Image (tube, rainbow, N blue to C red):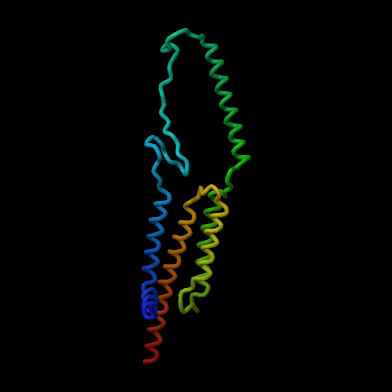
Amino acid sequence: MEMLMTRLREGCGRHLVVIILVALAVVEALSLVALTRMPSQPGLLIYGEEERGVIVTQPVLKISEIRGPRIDDEAAMIVADESAELSRSSRRSSCATQAAVSPCPTLPIGIWIFLLAAYVALLIFNFSYTFRQAARPQWFWETLYTALALIGWYAWDGCRDHIWFPFAVVQFGLITFAIYAYLLEKRLLEKEKQDTTQKA
C-alpha cells in the first residue's frame, strides 16, 4: 500500500500541470451543465433563473373592424388614457416595492468582477513572493483563499444570480496554479542542471 502511495505521489509530482489542466476541463464541463437549463415548456425562454413566455404580438383591431355597437372617438381616447396611466402607476409602485423589499440580497456585478480580479491578483502575489526560495509547490494559503472566495459568494449572493463567480474562481485559480507549477518545475530543473554541471 505504501509503494502504491509513493508511486502515486511521484506520478502526481511529475505530471502536476496535466492533472491541473484536466481538473480545469472538468470544472468547465460542470459550469456548462450548471448554467444551461432546458425550459419546462417549449414556448418559454430562460433568462437567468426564471422562465419567461415568448410575447406574440397580435394585430390591433381598428374601430372599423369591430362588429357590434360603435363608440365615439372621445370615449375611446379617455379609456385608453386612463388604462395607460393606471398601468404606469402600477409599474412604479411594483418597482418601488421590489426595490424596498428584496427577497434575497446580492452584490452588483461590478463588485463581483472586482472580487474576482482581487482574488487572482492575490494568488499571483503569493506565488511570486516566495517563487525564488520555493523547493516545492505551495498550495495551503491559496486553497484557503479559494475557499474563502467560494464561501463569500455563497453568503453574499442569496439569489444565486451570479452563478458564474464560483466557476470563474476555480478556473482562474487552476490556471494560475498550473502556470506557477510549470514555471517552478522549469526553474527547479534548470537549478538541478546547474548543480550537476558545477559538480562535474
Residue placed furthest toward the front: 1
Q: Quadrant of residue 77?
A: top right
In percent of the image, x 62 and y 41: which residue is there? Answer: 101
In percent of the image, x 57 and y 27: which residue is there? Answer: 88
Q: Quadrant of the C terminus?
A: bottom left
Residue placed furthest toward the bottom: 200
| 20 on left or right of 82 | left
- Does residue 118 sit above or below 191 in this rendering? above
Q: Quadrant of residue 78?
A: top right
Q: How many labels, in total?
A: 0
Q: Quadrant of the N terminus?
A: bottom left
Q: Nearer the viewer, residue 135 or 34?
A: 34
Give residue 69's position: percent from left, percent from top.
Answer: 47, 7
In percent of the image, x 43 and y 34: which residue is there? Answer: 53
Give residue 191's position: percent from left, percent from top.
Answer: 41, 82
- Does residue 138 sit above or below 109 in this rendering? below
Give residue 181's position: percent from left, percent from top.
Answer: 43, 71
- Does residue 35 sit above or below 71 in this rendering? below
Q: Nearer the viewer, residue 52 or 76?
A: 52
Residue placed furthest toward the top: 69
Give residue 28's position: percent from left, percent from top.
Answer: 40, 57
| 161 on left or right of 188 | right
In percent of the image, x 42 and y 54: which residue is there? Answer: 31
